[in-house]
Image: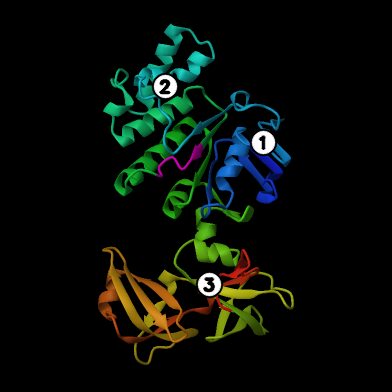
Amino acid sequence: MPEYDVVCENLCKNFGDFEAVKNFNLKVEKGEYIAFLGPSGCGKSTTLRCIAGHNDITSGEVFLRGKVVNDLPPGQRDTSMMFQNFALFPHKTVNDNVGFGLKMRGISVGERHKRVEEMLQVVGLEGMGRRKPGELSGGQQQRVALARALITEPAVLLLDEPLGHLDELLRIKLRGELKNLQRKLGITSIHVTHNQDECLTMGDRLVVMNEGIIEQIGTPQDIYIRPATFFVATFVGDNFVLRGEIESVDKNIVSLKTTMGTFKINTQRSLPEKGEDVGFSIRADLIHVLRDGQKSDNQIEGVVEFVEYIGYVVKVRTRLESGDEVIIKQTQDEYFETPPKEGDQIRLGWAADEAILLTGPYTVGGKSIYGE
C-alpha cells in the first residue's frame, strides 16, 4: 500500500460567495514532487495555503501523514513554506536566518549551530553563514530560504512560486538544483507555478487547475502528450485545438466535422455521448508542411505570418482563412529542407493517430476557448 504524506478530500475554499477551490481531491505519496499548474486566479496558491494552514478550509479535509489537520495552526502541521520573495530577515546573518525555526523550537545554541552548518553544506553555501541577505546573489538568497525551510525536517515542503522573480538562466539552473536536492533528501514537495517548463521538468506529477477545479492529474508526459480536456490542450504546449461534432465512427477512427472541414482522429478513448462537446488537439511538433503531391490524413491551408528561429527549433506561425492561427514546430533539418517564408501559401498535415480527441466543456467562465 502506498504511504501518503498529503491527502486532500473534497477540499473547498470560499471567499464570501466566491468559490476559489471546489472539491479538490489529491493523494501525494511520500517523497513525491507534485507541481500545481494553472493561470493566475485558478486556485493553486489558495489550495497550497489551505494545506499549510494559512487559509482556513470552508469544507472538506486535509490529512498530513494520516492525521486530520484542518484545525491545526501552521506551526503544528509539520510543513514548511518557501515563498516567492524568500521572506528573509535582511538584518540577520545567513546563520540566523537558517536557524530561526530551530530557535523558535527551543533548540540549544550548540545544536542549532551544528545543524545550520550541515544544512549550508547541503545547499552549497558553506562559509557564507556570516553574510547578510543583501550581500548575496538572487540564487544564493534562494538557497538560504530553502535551507531555512528544510532545517526543521518537515514532512512536506510547500513552494509558492519559489523561482518566479529570478531571471531565465538562473531559474533553469536552480530548478535543477532544487529537484536534485529534493531527490537526495526524499522530502515530499508541492510546488505552485504558472511556468509550464518548470512544471514539466520538475514535477513527478502535475495537477492542472482552472477556476478552482482540477482539470487533469498526470505525469508530465501524460499532460503534454495526452491532454484530457479542452482547457489542458489550450493551456499546456502549442496545440492546435478545434471544436466540432462527430460525423461518423469506423472502428477507432472518428470523423469530426468542424467549421474548417472534416478531420480524422484515431482514438482509444471512449466515445462521448450524444450532444457532448467534442473536439481535437494536435501538437505543434506533429504538424508538418506538406510538399507538392504529398498527402496526409488531415490537411489545412494557410499563409505563413511569422517565422521564429530559436536555434534548436523553428516556430512557423500560419494564419488560416478562418483567421485562426496555427503554430508548428520544426527541427532545423525539417525547416531547411523546405523553408517556409513569410507570405507563403502552405499546406499543413498530420496523421489521424497523432491527434487527441477532446471532450467538453469547451468554455471557461462562459467564454469559448476555441471555435464558436
| Image quadrant in which the C terminus is located | bottom right
Distance between the Cα atoms at labels 3 and 2?
A: 47 Å
Dominant secondary structure (helix, strand or loop) of the stretch shown in magenta: loop
Highlighted range, magenta: 159-164
Q: Nearer the viewer, residue 299 or 77?
A: 77
Q: Nearer the viewer, residue 287 or 151?
A: 151
Q: In the figure, is residue 147 to the left or right of 104?
A: left
**Residue at horizontal 61%, vertical 41%?**
28
Q: Secondary structure beneath disc 3?
A: strand
Percent position (x, y) of residue 224?
Answer: 50, 60
Q: Nearer the viewer, residue 350 or 78?
A: 78
Of badges 2 and 1, nearer the viewer stands 1
The residue at the far front in this view is 16
* Residue holding disc 3: 281
In the image, residue 106 sits, relative to residue 313, either above or below, namely above
Of badges 3 and 2, nearer the viewer stands 2
Q: In the figure, is residue 246 to the left or right of 232?
A: right
For the residues bearing labels 1 and 3, Cβ distance under 8 angstroms: no
In the image, residue 107 sits, relative to residue 138, either above or below, namely above
Q: Which amino acid type corresponds to the residue marked 3 in the rendered image? A: Ser
Image mark for residue 56: 1
Distance between the Cα atoms at labels 2 and 1?
A: 28 Å
Between discs 3 and 2, the one toward the N terminus: 2
Q: Which amino acid type corresponds to the residue marked 2 in the rendered image? A: Val
Q: In the figure, is residue 199 to the left or right of 278?
A: left
Pointer 1 local density, CA inside 10 Å: few below 14, some 14–19, many at least 20: some
